[in-house]
């Protein structure tokens, strides 16, 4: 019995060790991981500058996401429309990223981070908040695009 328990603990250690080896923080990154972090920064820079046409190139045509402001998942058209609605009454917005983790599996990647947002509406009211974001990226025709996303406050 002791031998079986010891073997079980060793197997668990190996499994968890291998699983954690596939997840990296910003300290140790492959070329693709660095590219994805740069794409995330560019994505939110365009959003902060209210450049919606620039954002279209980041999304995969089959995109589906569950944004914090929506009670249910949305497709690409709804996601674009809701971003425009949410920012229509803003004078300015700044967004900074705090990368947390990234995992790669071939041409698919899942990226986790926090964003810190400061926005000023047309009346001069300033709001600050942070939220958690996850993007699932897929490489299609040699280009990384967001296939899925989720955010939560």
Image (cartoon, helix red, strand yellow):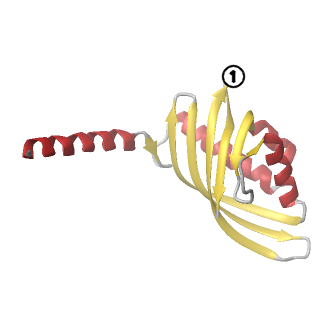
Q: Examine the rendered structure and indicate whether residue 84 appears above or below residue 31.
A: below
Mark 1 Cα shell of 10 Å, populated few (<14), some (14-19), many (≥20): few
Residue under the image location 68 percent in, 69 percent down: 129
Looking at the image, the residue that sits furthest to the top is 141
Residue under the image location 56 percent in, 42 percent down: 110
Residue under the image location 23 percent in, 39 percent down: 11
Residue under the image location 57 percent in, 45 percent down: 111
Q: Nearer the viewer, residue 105 or 35?
A: 105
Q: Nearer the viewer, residue 42 or 129?
A: 129
- Residue beneath disc 1: 141
Q: SS at mark 1?
A: loop
88 horizontally vs 16: left or right: right
Location of residue 57 in the rendering, given as x and y in whole percent from the top left corner: 78, 36
Q: Examine the rendered structure and indicate whether residue 9 appears above or below residue 124.
A: above
Location of residue 64 in the rendering, given as x and y in whole percent from the top left corner: 71, 41
Q: Which quarter shows the N terminus?
A: top left
Q: Examine the rendered structure and indicate whether residue 18 appears above or below residue 120.
A: above
Q: Examine the rendered structure and indicate whether residue 41 appears above or below residue 94.
A: above
Location of residue 114 in the rendering, given as x and y in whole percent from the top left corner: 60, 58
55 horizontally vs 135: left or right: right
Labels in figure, total = 1
Location of residue 19 in the rendering, given as x and y in whole percent from the top left corner: 38, 41
Task: Place residue 89 in its image quadrant.
Answer: bottom right
86 horizontally vs 131: left or right: right
Q: Which quarter shows the C terminus?
A: bottom right
């Amino acid at each position: 019995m002791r031998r079986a328990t010891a073997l079980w603990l060793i197997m668990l250690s190996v499994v968890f060790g291998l699983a954690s080896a596939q997840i990296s923080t910003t300290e140790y990154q492959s070329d693709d991981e660095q590219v994805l972090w740069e794409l995330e920064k560019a994505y939110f820079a365009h959003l902060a500058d209210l450049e919606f046409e620039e954002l279209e190139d980041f999304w995969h045509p089959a995109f589906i996401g569950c944004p914090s402001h929506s009670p249910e998942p949305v497709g690409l058209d709804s996601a674009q429309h809701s971003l425009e609605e949410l920012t229509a009454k803003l004078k300015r917005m700044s967004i900074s990223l705090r990368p947390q983790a990234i995992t790669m599996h071939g041409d698919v990647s899942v990226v986790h981070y926090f964003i810190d947002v400061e926005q000023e509406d047309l009346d001069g009211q300033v709001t600050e908040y942070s939220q958690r974001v996850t993007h699932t990226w897929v490489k299609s025709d040699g280009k990384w695009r967001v296939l899925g996303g989720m955010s939560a406050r």
